[in-house]
Image (tube, coloured by chain):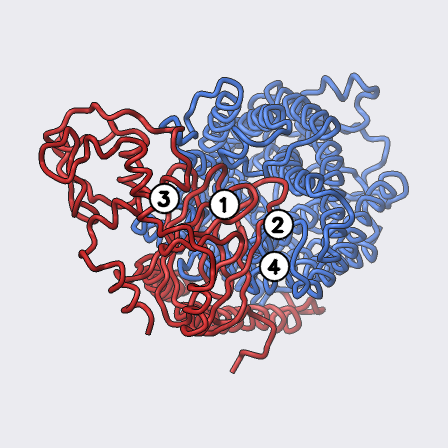
Amino acid sequence: MFDNLPLWPARASTGAGNVDALYIFLLLLSGFMCLAIFSMIVVFALRYRRQHGHEAEQIEGSTALEITWSVVPLGIFLVIFAWGAFIFFQERTPPRDASEIYVVAKQWMWKLEHVEGQREINELHVPVGRDVKMIMTSQDVIHSFYIPAFRIKQDVLPGRYTTAWFRATKPGVYHLFCAEYCGSQHSGMIGQIVVMEPAQYEAWLSGGSSSGSLASNGESIFQQLGCVTCHRSDTQGRGPNLAGIFGKPVQLEDGLTVVADENYVRESILSPSAKVVKGFKPIMPVFQGLVSEEQLTELVAYVKSLSAAPTAGTKVRESKVQ
Amino acid sequence: MATAVITPERENYLNQEYGIKSWLLTVDHKRIALLYLVSITFFFFIGGFFALLIRLELLTPAGDLVQADTYNKLFTMHGQVMIFFFLIPSIPAVLGNFLVPLMIGAKDLAFPRLNLLSWYLYIIAGALMLHCICTGGVDTGWTFYTPFSTAFSNTKVVEAGVAIFIAGFSSILTGLNFVVTIHRMRAPGMTWDRLPLFIWAHYATSVIQLLGTPVLAITLLLVVFERVFHLGIFDPTRGGDPLLFQHLFWFYSHPAVYIMILPAMAVESEVIACFTRKRIFGYKFVAMSSIAIAVFGFLVWAHHMFVAGISLYSALIFSALSYLVAVPSAIKVFNWTATMYKGSITFTTPMLYAFGFIGLFTMGGLTGLFLAALGIDVHVTDTYFVIAHFHYIMVGGAVMGYLGGLHFWWPKISGRMYPEWLGKFAALIVFLGFNLTFFPQFILGYMGMPRRYWQYPPEFQVLNVLSTAGSTILAVGYVLPMVYFLWSMRYGKPATENPWNAAGLEWKTSSPPPTFNFDQPPVVDFEAYDYEHIPEVEEVPVG
């Protein structure tokens, strides 16, 4: 019902409506509070303006009132907190089978790569109705990936991956903004999100130029850099076998356990001695400065693909397109 | 109740000595307050000039008035000048410096020379900042986020950092002086529960200045060292973490918001009591709410970082704590409103500013509830919604408080009355101009316009034009008081000892006060806001 008012951006994702609902609730609540306080002030100012023969009545205060106007707002605040936290929890928990887009931000452009290998710059094509998860990193300073129509924003940091996800609901073209100040052309670091009907999207996907899937590119880097000599697909290698490890807990030399997620794989490539797997020696060379962010994402995608079911490549694709 | 008009010949802190040396080497807290008044006014107009250029650039979607790099420097230096060289010193260093000893019945602050040193540090810092501005400026945003500030910006980050580092020590010294003075120098009978709320709020502010500012100093030093010596503290390729900077920075810079707003609340408590002729409703709760704000204020810094890459659970905790700090602010607003009940209200200029303060601070506070809600913050953080929110607090709140306070105590400071009708007119202009400037920015923010954008998509233009129009009105509202205050120093009607018939020790000495404040050391045998025993003024004085 509010769609035609230019008070908010298009509502084009499953999450956008939830954010707007809380926003409208808060608008009404604040409107009511402002109205209550301001009308009280106006009434008092008129009713108790200085008049001859009238003196101010000294009132010390009222503990009962103080407690009321502390506890009641606190109660309301806690409701807002819980509501906001609930939305945030959803925003920060991507569905397990979301399809992945790798995002590399740099001064001043967005580079977006589909798992299938399509590369885009400052533009992202996605189908309606599919859960899409961005795995993002920056090549230089901090940026922030912001799509107002989806009500999502996540800072993109150098040196690690952060994630965000959405499910688009409405075909159209929406703004992509960099929301964290990043230097001269910060306001030029913008792009567009093109949301398409699934059929159109399939056509776009097959029509575009693709230079091989991320995982297969990652595999060839894996060969080139000689990773494969130690990380063998049997148990004889000097490094751990990487098949099936992604997303699983890994026992470390120092007794701790970590889950092998994107940040773990990344760190283990760039500074391998930070977390050494139990039973192995810290002999792997450091790759910090030797691989680009794009190569890193491809390597991560490759390691990930080693943990997918054998037929995952095609199967996942089918299940995602509804 | 003495009501005699003070003859101009009478010796006071202004005419006791003449000459530039008597000002530059003074240790009188009132003269130092005036030194601060002149210097922060200078920086206010520099910061305001930057703001006007920013608004003019944003009149059109294209970047056409200045270059992108210039624009980035403008908003950076607008923020740095306004925060570190105007807002943080504003009420404490001017009105606080002038009034804290007077209000508690002391001759001066505990450490008069330290007070002068604090002004000199401010001037050194300000000169360095001016040099930085004139020789190229800095473009990191006032927040200095790493690794942009440490490894990418080609501007004068080190110089700006050092300037703010030094300004921080000026602020620490003022806070230290206030804490010791309030503890040790109260007149006989001036017990803690008789202290004016102005003093309570300044005490809370001083504690924040003392505990928070050193962290800012350390953080800026780290940035400088990282930039010069490439230590790697914030550099992920060398095992550092850029988020560490944000934690350290906001650990000071969130409480710094309370350094700016608590003194404005301090002013409002005095003004509202005087012009309703009443003791502040719930004195103890208002006093304690200042302390609560100072304490809780240190526990909410990471609400600036909900999308920065902190964990889900730390975000939850900082969101919840942020709602706690909203309660004492709400308590103050409710108590001021309740004070008006059954009062005898006059609509003087300071009172108009107080009405404006309550209105704008309430809106600033309520929109803070939006930002503390995690799900909404994700959408509106780093947009114009945040810009509007903190300008409602810092300009709508702190600057309105500062201006209201300046009008209220101007007769005491200068010994002259300002033209009341012009004062009211300017207050109205400021209120209207402010709302026209900043209200549209809430809508812009929710529509998704990011902050720090030099150019923007055309659908945001209408609201930006409104905002720019408002800023020119606001500028008029800010220039007017400066003009008539200067005018009044020569032509204003001489002020009596207590032109508003206000309670409080500062009104029981002449206007302007003598160098050592009181001819007889005061003894306090009355409660704060003892309006029951003070007659109303017959006519509202006009200059």
Q: Can residue A60 be seen in this view?
A: no
Q: The blue chain is which one?
A: B
Mark 3, residue position: A297
Q: How many labels does the image show?
A: 4
Q: What residue is pinned by disc 2?
A: A187
Query: Which quarter of the picture shows residue A21?
Result: bottom left
B232 or A29: nearer the eye? Answer: B232
Sequence-wise, the earlier of marks 2 and 3 is 2
Give the number of the mark in front: 2 or 4.
2
Which residue is outermost to the right?
B491
Residue B122 appears left or right of B378: right
Q: Do labels 3 and 4 share a chain?
A: no
The residues tagged by marks 1 and 3 sit, at their Cα atoms, a distance apart of 18 Å
Q: What chain does mark 2 sit on? A: A
Q: Give the percent coordinates (x, y) of residue A193.
A: 50, 62
Secondary structure found at label 4: helix
In which quadrant of the rendered view does residue A138 lie? top left
Nearest the viewer among B495 and B49 is: B49
| Quarter residue B357 falls in | bottom right
| Amino acid type assigned to the residue bearing label 3 in the image | Thr
Rendered residue at 30%/29% (across/down): A271
Residue lying at 81% horizontally and 19% vertically, measured from the top left: B20
How far apart in space, not on screen, are marks 3 and 4 (Cα)? 48 Å
The residues bearing labels 1 and 4 have C-alpha atoms spaced at a distance of 32 Å
